[in-house]
Amino acid sequence: MPILKMTTIQPCTYAWLLLLFLSTTSYLLGQGETGTLFITSILCITLIKGQLIIRYFMGVRGVKPLWHIIMGIYLAIIGAIIGIAYLSQ
């Protein structure tokens, strides 16, 4: 009879579960009203998801802080461009 090993859950598994939750939340918000509050909420959730993907799935978690700053600025710029494009309509 094989012995069962106790394994710990990796941080990327928690990040993946959080990504599933955030994706479902943004999908449900997108099905409702299309006001500025809903679009802003969806955009914020998307930026949080982007940060999770960068941190846990692109291997940026263990590098110098400069790379975290660069990727954070990149996400902020992309989010700002999308927000400006939406608000200019």
Image (tube, rainbow, N blue to C red):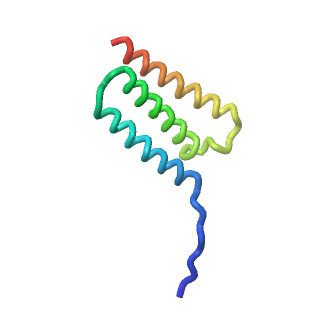
Residue located at (37% from left, 11% from top): 88
Q: Is residue 62 left or right of residue 80?
A: right
Residue ranking furthest to the bottom: 1
Quarter of the figure with the C terminus = top left
For the residue pair 38 and 53, the one nearer the viewer reads as 38
Residue 16 location (% of width, % of height):
49, 49
Q: Classify 23 as above or below 7.
A: above
Identify the residue shown where x is 60% and y is 45%. 59
Q: Nearer the viewer, residue 80 or 64?
A: 80
Residue, x 39% and y 23% (percent of image)? 37
The percent coordinates of residue 49 (x first, y second) are: 48, 38
Residue drawn at (53%, 51%), measured in percent from left and top? Answer: 14
Tag count: 0
Q: Quadrant of residue 32?
A: top left
Residue 4 vertical placement versus 87 (above, below): below
Give the image location of residue 47, x and y in percent: 49, 32
The percent coordinates of residue 51 (x first, y second) are 54, 36
Of the pair 66 and 17, the residue shown nearer to us:
17
Q: Residue furthest top?
A: 88
